[in-house]
Image (spheres, rainbow, N blue to C red):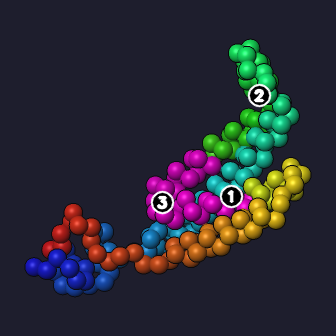
Amino acid sequence: MALHGPPRCHQHQHAIAPCSHPRFARSTILGDDTNVNRTTTVVLLAVLAQAAGNVFLTRGMKATAAIRPEAAGVMSWVEAAGTAAAQPDIWIGTILLITFFALCSAALSWADLSYVIPATAIGYVLNVAAGQFLLHETVPPSRWIGSLVVTAGVICVSRSARTPASAQAPASEPRA
């Protein structure tokens, strides 16, 4: 029996595409269109939670001006932690970043790492925009150019979501 070639039906041994058996089924990187839509939605929500979380966390930390390099004593660190813990923006930011982590973990449970993590990189662009427009930071053109390069990469990765995966079975599972 050949170990290569088209997938074979596990019951009748004839070449078919796609077979309903999961071991031999052809699919896209993320699965069917429902998985693509679900993954896109979850990744988008995760990125928004991450960008918003970073804004809140930054606002909270700047409001506390908690840790100064010249204050290296243990008590100054304890005071800084107490001051930071009292900031609602820090709590909101932390909750949003936990939400990002949970959504990203959920997406990784059904989609490829090579799709999910690069797709979350659009958060870099959102963070640069949030820095300039919400936190009133000065953002030099080089940072915007870098963000546009990241955006181009994200577009390339997201377009690959519909590319068929390899039709070959993993080496550990010989074909019948």
How far apart marks 1 and 3 lie (CA) works out to 16 Å
Give the crowd class for mark 2: few <14, some 14-19, many >=20 residues within 10 Å. few
Q: Position of residue 48 (x, y in %)?
A: 70, 56
Dominant SS of magenta comes to helix
| Number of numbered markers | 3
Residue 112 image position (x, y, % from top left): 46, 63
Disc 1, SS? helix
Q: In front here: 118 or 138?
A: 138
Q: Amino acid at mark 2?
A: Pro
Q: CA distance from mark 1 to mark 2?
A: 29 Å
Amino acid on which disc 1 is placed: Gly
Q: Which residues are magenta?
A: 100-126
Give how far apart the Cα atoms at labels 3 and 2 are: 38 Å
Marks 1, 2: nearer the viewer = 2
Residue 63 belongs to the span the image colors magenta = no
Q: Quadrant of residue 64?
A: top right
SS class, disc 3: helix
Viewed as shown, does residue 150 lie left or right of 82? left
- Dot 1: few (<14), some (14–19), or many (≥20) neighbours within 10 Å? many
Q: Residue furthest top?
A: 75
Between 107 and 131, the residue placed more toward the observer is 131
Horizontal relation, residue 170 to residue 80: left or right: left
At 20% across and 79% down in the image, what residue appears?
4
Q: Earlier in the sequence, mark 1 or mark 2?
A: 2
Name the kind of residue labelled 3 in the image. Leu
* Residue at the disc numbered 2: 69
Q: Which residue is mark 1?
A: 123
**Mark found first going from the N terminus, 3 or 2:** 2
